[in-house]
Image: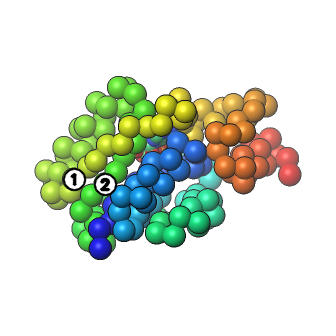
Amino acid sequence: MRRVLCPGSFDPVTNGHLDIISRASNLYDEVVVGVLINISKQSLFSVDERVEMMREVTKDYGNVKVDKFHGLTVDYCRQHDIPVIVRGLRAVSDFDYELQIAQMNHRMAGVETLFMATNPLYAFLSSSLMKEVVKYGGDISGLVPEVIHQRLVERLRGEK
Ligand code: ADP
């Protein structure tokens, strides 16, 4: 079985993430979305909430599994027999950092990283921008799934 890991914080998942995950799901037998437990980074949603939201919005793909992990991404790959990581590239600003991590991961464990060019419709999207816009009352419809939009509004504006 050909498997690929899509790792990230997904705090919360956006249509940019989903675009990469769905395109990867067309290329591989199974996509494992690895939601990172990062104790040094403050997140808006707990890791279990991020996993639950990711499961909800990927349930129709059929071959996407969602899991959480901490520590080195390559350790997760080794433990679960996943030889490839896919990462989305939005702009050159993503590139320096991503290249460095990809080279380190290859050196540590022989794990390959494939980069997927973002859909230009979503190139400007990031989870942090979505949070910022919602916090101050802006409209992000069409940029995140509707259920995620509602969760963001509830969490950031205290509304139901
Ligand atoms: P991290 O904290 O690891 O950067 P993110 O949740 O921000 O995690 O992103 C996870 C993955 O999704 C990364 O490969 C990132 O480049 C990609 N990504 C984030 N936003 C977009 C987007 N708008 N379009 C395509 N890929 C994206």
Element class at badge 1:
strand
Q: Residue at x 62, y 53 (%)?
A: 45
Q: Which residue is nearer to you in this view: 129 or 156? A: 129
Q: Which residue is mark 1?
A: 112
In the displayed structure image, the side of residue 77 where residue 44 appears, left or right: right
Amino acid at pointer 1:
Glu
Residue at the outermost top position? 92
Give above or below for 9 relative to 134: below
Circle on res. 85: 2
Amino acid at pointer 2:
Ile
**Neighbour tally class for label 2: few under 14, some 14-19, many 20 plus, Cα within 10 Å:** many
Residue 64 visible? The answer is yes
Labelled pair 2, 1 in contact (Cβ < 8 Å): yes
Q: Position of residue 76 (x, y in %)?
A: 32, 65
Element class at badge 2:
strand
- Assign ligand 1 to one image quadrant: top left
**Neighbour tally class for label 1: few under 14, some 14-19, many 20 plus, Cα within 10 Å:** some
Q: Residue at x 29, y 73 (%)?
A: 1
- Answer yes or no: disc 2 within 8 Å of ligand 1: no
Q: Quadrant of residue 134 in the image?
A: top right
How many labels were placed on the picture? 2
